[in-house]
Amino acid sequence: MFRTLPFLLFAWTHALAATPNILFILADDLGVRDLSIEGSTYHETPHIDRIAREGVRFTHGYATCQVCSPSRASIMTGKYPARHGITDWIGAATGKNWNRNNRILPSEYTLHLPHEDTSLAEALKEGGYRTFFAGKWHLGGEGSLPNDHGFDLNIGGHHRGSPPGGFFSPFRNPKMKDGPKGQSLPLRLANDTATFIKDKAGSPFFAFLSFYSVHGPIQTTPDLWKKYRDKAGKSPHQGDRFLIDRTLPVRQVQDCPIYAGMMETMDDAVGIVLKALDEAEIADNTIVIFTSDNGAEVTAKTATGPVRSNKGSCFEGGHRVPFIVSWPKGKIAKGKVSDQLIGLQDLYATFSEIMGVPLPDLRKGEKGAEDSLSLLPAWRGKKLIARPMFYNDHKESKDGAACAMRLDNP
């Protein structure tokens, strides 16, 4: 026994060293064409673009719902909203409290992330990962916060879906101390995440950086406002700046300096955590994912084209999102673009495969991650199996398109 112990310790240490770290960056209400790598000539996002240059950019990435809480719950459970039960943003009026004159009332929904499901963080923690959460949670209050669902450390995650104090300190966040007056919220979250990365660089970690950006209120600094105001004045765009889609005026050109300033600050925050990976010399074996929880907000000063409509709608603008992944040691080709159909609920099965942990066997009646498919083959350039994808309308009677399904030809 004593002769084999050193070998076992070596094997265990080697296995931990080979296990990739995971840095998952989730934007809030980001339009599918807001990034410069996605075609924006007005917004500047060099750090996010770097992830795409070092990995794969998926042009057909989808959230499971057009609002935040259901989509975020799908990430954490590997399930569609109809299965995990959170079918609207938590806090929204529903049932008999729905105060619009509709013939059909929206159904009641679950008000917190279900405890009976093994969350993504819990699964990773069981696999030996240190887990960290920073930013927007919006999956329940006390008793259903990040620490209650597998995260070792929670900074800023609470029941609210928008930043209580806006994007500058004082933050008025019950789970995060205020910084110096005027401190940037996304930069603060990024610096706290960077500190965690450096502290845990010797063991596998799962760091979930969940920005409030670019959810309202739309705010930026005077310097960034001036920068993008001047840039907007040089825009070559000709023609209408808005078109009417049904009753909604849809912006056709990106020229809002406040929104562009928010985009730059969020990108700078991404740069902070990428720099932390570089300085800790762990970037090669860290999976970095950047995506959004749903499409651009209705009130956002951004263009959502070429897709129709935006957040809250079952049309594509509501649930089509950017999705970028890099992992140098994971045999992911650099600078590739894929048009394969993927969903945010697929991350659960993807990380399970990477850890070598089998998903529940549905054929035997086991439950869990029923709607999740591993994306690892697609990350490496292989074809995924054809399957339908479903998109939930959080208020069934609000839109003419109450729900949607996409089925690509096999």
Image (cartoon, grey):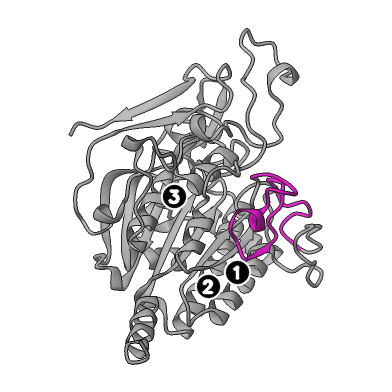
Earlier along the polypeptide chain: callout 3 or callout 2?
A: 3
Between circles 3 and 2, the one closer to the viewer is 2
Q: Which residue is mark 2?
A: 273
Mark 1 and mark 2 in contact (Cβ < 8 Å)? yes
Q: Which residue is mark 1?
A: 190
Residue 161 sits inside the magenta stretch: yes
- The residues colored magenta run 139-168
Majority secondary structure in the magenta region: loop
- For label 1, the SS is helix
Residue 190 in the image: state x and y as whole percent: 60, 69
341, 259: nearer the viewer: 341
- Relative to 130, 370 lies left or right: left
- Relative to 261, 315 lies left or right: left
Mark 3 → mark 2, Cα distance in angstroms: 35 Å
User: Residue drawn at (80%, 72%), measured in percent from left and top?
Assistant: 180
- Label 3 sits on what residue type? Pro
292, 350: nearer the viewer: 350
Neighbor class of circle 2 (other Cα within 10 Å; few <14, some 14-19, many 20+) is: many
User: Residue drawn at (41%, 51%), measured in percent from left and top?
Assistant: 347
Mark 2 → mark 1, Cα distance in angstroms: 6 Å
The numbered disc on residue 335 is none
Residue 149 sits inside the magenta stretch: yes
Residue 44: in sight, yes or no? Answer: no
Q: Give the image quarter of residue 3.
A: bottom left
Earlier along the polypeptide chain: callout 2 or callout 1?
A: 1
- For label 3, the SS is loop
The numbered disc on residue 236 is 3
Q: Give the image quarter of residue 379.
A: bottom left
Q: Give the image quarter of residue 301.
A: top right
Residue 208 in the image: state x and y as whole percent: 54, 61
User: Residue drawn at (33%, 61%), measured in percent from left and top?
Assistant: 356
- Label 2 sits on what residue type? Val
